Amino acid sequence: MPDFATLVGFFASSEGASNLPLQMLIIFGVAKLCGEICERLRAPAIAGEIIAGMLIGPGLLNWIQPSELIHSLADLGVMFLLFRVGLEVRASELVRVGGVAMMAALGGVIMPFIAGYLIIIQLGHSQIEAVFVGAAMVATSVGITAQVLTQRGLLNHRASRIILVAAVIDDVLGLLILAVVSSLAKGGIDYLQLSLTAALAIGFVLLIVFWGVGTATRILPLVRSHLRMAEADYVVALVLLFGLSVLAVYAGVAAIVGAFLAGMALGESADQRVHELTSGAAELLVPFFLVNIGLQLDPKVFLDPVALVPALLIFVAAVFSKLFGAGLGAFRLGRRDAFKVGIGMIPRGEVGMVVAQIGLSFGVVPQNIYAAVVFMSVMTTIVAPPLLKWAYRDARA
Amino acid sequence: MPDFATLVGFFASSEGASNLPLQMLIIFGVAKLCGEICERLRAPAIAGEIIAGMLIGPGLLNWIQPSELIHSLADLGVMFLLFRVGLEVRASELVRVGGVAMMAALGGVIMPFIAGYLIIIQLGHSQIEAVFVGAAMVATSVGITAQVLTQRGLLNHRASRIILVAAVIDDVLGLLILAVVSSLAKGGIDYLQLSLTAALAIGFVLLIVFWGVGTATRILPLVRSHLRMAEADYVVALVLLFGLSVLAVYAGVAAIVGAFLAGMALGESADQRVHELTSGAAELLVPFFLVNIGLQLDPKVFLDPVALVPALLIFVAAVFSKLFGAGLGAFRLGRRDAFKVGIGMIPRGEVGMVVAQIGLSFGVVPQNIYAAVVFMSVMTTIVAPPLLKWAYRDARA
């Protein structure tokens, strides 16, 4: 007779719409349960929700397989997460920290790239592999840090604002590096194409920050007051969220950058009701973002020394290169806040995996290095929340 | 050069995660736009959101194709819809109207079945085809009516309560009819199996109504008070929502019956915050439920007389047989409220399509009759909101 765990996996993976409630129950329920356990162990709940994904994923219990549906719910989750963060910060205050954030983003891009490059060369791999792994170690995934700072009420701390702005700049830099390494894998760099890519991405972000926010603040209340539909404020907010996410994707940056800018554009005019309704959607969807990260990592990698050693090496290099690179860039804030910025930029999340996947598909990144990048991506998201808690121990909500 | 509409369709249907924000924008944005237009024409917004699905679907603009993702978001949408309805009604008051609701459900099942059977026999089709179409005309999809009554604040009207209870009973009866016709298509009826199916479904519903609600009201506040996680009340509510939906599916009834019962179980202990957070998720997801209905129907059917005539015949029969059947069952309420009940039971939604699809897959329902059933299902959901508005014209919110 099959044991309970096997039965759950069998039912959850069976075909047809009838398994949707069960998938929802398992992912949401186990995430919240692991989060609660972590909180009782004085660890951040968010790390527990990522570990929940490793637990129910194919490597251990095999109750849930990664799927397009879970991936889409995860994408929606991180969009709502960044949208909610955008609602709670002021564009004017972010612009003020632009200079330091730019230095932090640059330092946090250059150091991990060099670190990744050197490690892979030292391990005896080719130059193109080294370039790809370096590129995969660059991009910060700001969702994890944003969620921790939101939950702890620390979003408006100076270091937090710098992290948010640096993450947006980091995303643009990551786009450019991705464009360069993709061209390298295909044969050569088209500098005109690269300049256009850069101009479009930078233009989009600057346009929204300097012109869009003010326009939205003036025009949206007028639009809403003319609508007869129920919950018009929330509907307009969601249309702006999806609309700017679409534009961001076409401009070449991540959808979450658009979601963040949409939140910022609404932040000064949205009322309490919009904040609460947004939370209702975010609380439902964010666990799917966290679980989906954990689903990518097979925890059996911890038991295999041949796989574990390069993975650990890349992981440790990813943590310290980002910490020192971004921290040095933000050093004029003083040691403590620079440290907060460095820690806040550590999580890599999905972006690094995407870069490594492209390398895998071009045949320039071997399977074991790809696995090491996935390990690095997931583990940086798991260690970041406790490190952040510790780095912000002197900050008040 | 391709026109704008073709370009939108091209981008929205392109592969990869990057099209998710665009799909969200199109479905949510067009649904809300069509809803707003309908409201300005003094028609209910909900009809506009279903028509939006016909507009952007494969038959007209072809911006959106039905997909597993949209289907899942639609299923989540109607689960949240019924959960929210459950939160706003009292179990004790529903039990009180059980007798009338049972009669309304029975009348509303028998009359449409006979009507569908006779029409198909008259059109010269076989007896098994007639049984399948009759079965497809039986099941009420309560989501549409529940949404209209929620938006107009009429959920606690006597007729509304009867509609909700009758819809749950209707779902159990529909399950039994589906079991019978499936066995017929396969060769014969297994009466033992059928009795077990009935006992399980009825037992589940009665157990939750008479024992679960009281238990939840006593135990849940205790559970929540011991949790350290953020938004613990909402998390427990969602776990109960998904949990009872799973049990409902295993008991053979629709997931939305479980969602409705979960809402009811929480109704007496959930605070304002849970209501608001639930609304935040429901407002996001319900448009996907409505658009997904419209997506099923190719509006070109209106231009083809050969397809339109049997479709119109089945549609008109579906409206009047349900109106008279359920209305007669509820006649002891007096003419006006019986009329409200009859109107409220008209929408068929997805259930009828599922029955017809099974018939199609067994080869006992031809393609043109299947199309007619889809037409009937979608059109009953579009005409129901304006009819409900009219039937409830004497009721106060």
Image: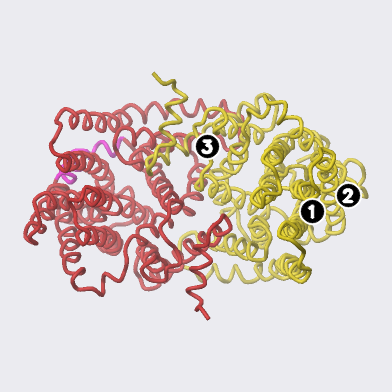
Chain colours: A red, B yellow
Task: State which chain disc 3 sits on.
Answer: B
Which callout, 3 or 2, points at the residue further toward the start of the chain? 3
Magenta run includes residue A93? yes
Residue B59 image-quadrant placement:
top right
Mark 3 crowd level (few <14, some 14–19, many ≥20, 10 Å Cα): many
- What amino acid does circle 3 point to? Phe
- What amino acid does circle 1 point to? Ala
- What amino acid does circle 2 point to? Ala
Task: State which chain disc 2 sits on.
Answer: B
The residue that appears at 65% across and 28% down in the rendered structure is B38
Task: Give the residue at mark 1.
Answer: B166
Mark 1 crowd level (few <14, some 14–19, many ≥20, 10 Å Cα): many
Task: Give the residue at mark 3.
Answer: B28
Magenta residues span A92-106
Q: Is residue A307 above or below residue A177?
A: below
Magenta stretch: dominant secondary structure: helix
Task: Give the residue at mark 2.
Answer: B330
Q: Along the horizontal axis of the image, is A41 left or right of A165?
A: right
- Asked if badges 3 and 1 are on one and the same chain, I answer yes
